[in-house]
Image: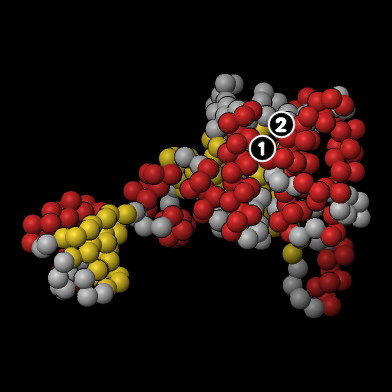
């Protein structure tokens, strides 16, 4: 059911493509000229979720899971086969002017800037497209240039910018009209670690300043951990998980990691699976429901200098979720 109070509300969304198929060989090629056969490929199947105003949600899944197809439907680039969608009260595929002024789609592998011109010229084109008042445009442009640390880079032809510099300019160009909702498809793709951190910091700041809702797809789990309290995991076009990031490990990882440092060397293999070991420091993998008992035993039986209990890395948890393939 559609939630009119949500920034994004999706109910039983489905997208199927008709793909031509034929066998190899000349005969099959000639036959396909007069009688082409197709098969249906379902990219998104019965997807339902909602995103509150001002919420940042990670939209995770392996390649081919249906992430980009979903974002394209939410931004109005694709018409769904079935289901209902409302984004900011609009049906995206109607491409209404008021809706387009309130949203943006940033794709890390797509170039929106004019390749041979400085980014400033592309910014001017965006101003004309959105009919932004000059004073508002200049204020927003200067704010974005400052926040993204673009400086004099905006005066260089885009072709002369590095990948990270170009990505920052792409993001600035996409936010000049100050959208209320951001669909971000791999915005840190191919960037080095410092640049990823700067982009994440900027997105968090933009969310706080303007209360924008953000839906983020990424393969970099550091992006998710830094920005998203909630994640939606999609696999084979269906949702596997929708909930707090902190609950994801509980749902799909049946173990925790325990790192214990002792005053004296000891063999701790009887307490759990030894992942790493040195004379006095041991990393154990133990069943989640045994964590409290094992911790109590270690503290009572050994002279413990330090002990930490951690969930497995989020990358490992996501892989376990994909491997399970069972929606929750």
Q: Residue at x 51, y 42 (%)?
A: 228
Left or right, 207 with respect to 264, comes to right
Left or right, 278 with respect to 226, comes to left
Look at the numbered discs 1 and 2 and tell me whether their residues touch, using CB distance below 8 Å. Answer: yes
Alpha-carbon distance for marks 1 and 2?
7 Å
Query: What residue is shown with label 1?
Result: 182
128, above or below 323, in the image = above
Q: Residue at x 58, y 51 (%)?
A: 197
The quarter of the picture where residue 328 lies is top left
Type of colouring = secondary structure
Q: Residue at x 76, y 31 (%)?
A: 140
Left or right, 44 with respect to 112, comes to left
Question: Considering depth in this image, is 259 or 58 the residue closer to the camera?
Answer: 259
164, above or below 283, in the image = above
Question: Considering depth in this image, is 127 or 43 the residue closer to the camera?
Answer: 127
Of the 4 image quadrants, the one containing the N terminus is top right
Left or right, 305 with respect to 11, comes to left
Question: Can see residue 200?
Answer: yes
Task: Name the secondary structure under disc 2.
Answer: loop
**Residue 268 percent across, percent down from the top left:** 17, 70
Disc 1: CA contacts within 10 A as few (<14), some (14-19) or many (>=20): many
**Residue 88 percent across, percent down from the top left:** 66, 26
**Residue 175 percent across, percent down from the top left:** 74, 37
Residue occupying the far left of the picture: 301
Residue occupying the far top of the picture: 5
**Residue 132 percent across, percent down from the top left:** 85, 27
Query: What residue is shown with label 2?
Result: 179
């Amino acid at each position: 059911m559609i939630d009119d109070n949500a920034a994004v509300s999706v109910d039983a969304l489905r997208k199927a493509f008709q793909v031509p198929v034929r066998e190899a060989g000349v005969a099959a090629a000639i036959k396909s000229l007069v009688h082409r056969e197709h098969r249906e490929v379902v990219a998104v199947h019965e997807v339902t979720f909602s995103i509150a105003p001002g919420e940042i949600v990670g939209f995770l899944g392996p390649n081919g899971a249906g992430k980009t197809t979903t974002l394209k439907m939410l931004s109005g680039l694709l018409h769904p086969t079935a289901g209902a969608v409302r984004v900011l009260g609009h049906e995206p595929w109607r491409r209404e002017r008021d809706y387009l002024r309130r949203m943006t789609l940033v794709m890390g592998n797509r170039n929106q800037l004019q390749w041979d011109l400085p980014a400033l010229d592309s910014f001017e084109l965006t101003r004309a497209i959105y009919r932004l008042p000059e004073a508002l445009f200049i204020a927003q442009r200067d704010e974005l240039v400052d926040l993204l640390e673009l400086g004099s880079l905006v005066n260089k032809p885009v072709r002369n910018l590095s990948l990270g510099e170009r990505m920052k300019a792409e993001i600035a160009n996409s936010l000049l009209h100050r959208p209320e909702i951001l669909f971000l498809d791999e915005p840190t793709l191919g960037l080095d670690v410092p640049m990823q951190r700067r982009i994440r910091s900027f997105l968090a700041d933009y969310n706080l300043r303007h209360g924008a809702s953000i839906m983020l797809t990424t393969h970099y789990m550091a992006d998710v951990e830094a920005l998203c309290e909630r994640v939606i995991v999609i696999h084979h076009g269906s949702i596997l998980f929708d909930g707090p990031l902190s609950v994801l490990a509980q749902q799909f990882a049946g173990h925790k990691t325990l790192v214990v440092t002792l005053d004296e060397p000891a063999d701790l293999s009887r307490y759990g699976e030894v992942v790493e070991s040195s004379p006095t420091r041991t990393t154990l993998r133990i069943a989640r429901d045994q964590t409290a008992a094992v911790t109590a035993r270690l503290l009572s039986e050994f002279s413990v200098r330090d002990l930490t209990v951690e969930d497995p890395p989020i990358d490992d948890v996501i892989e376990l979720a994909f491997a399970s393939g069972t929606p929750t």
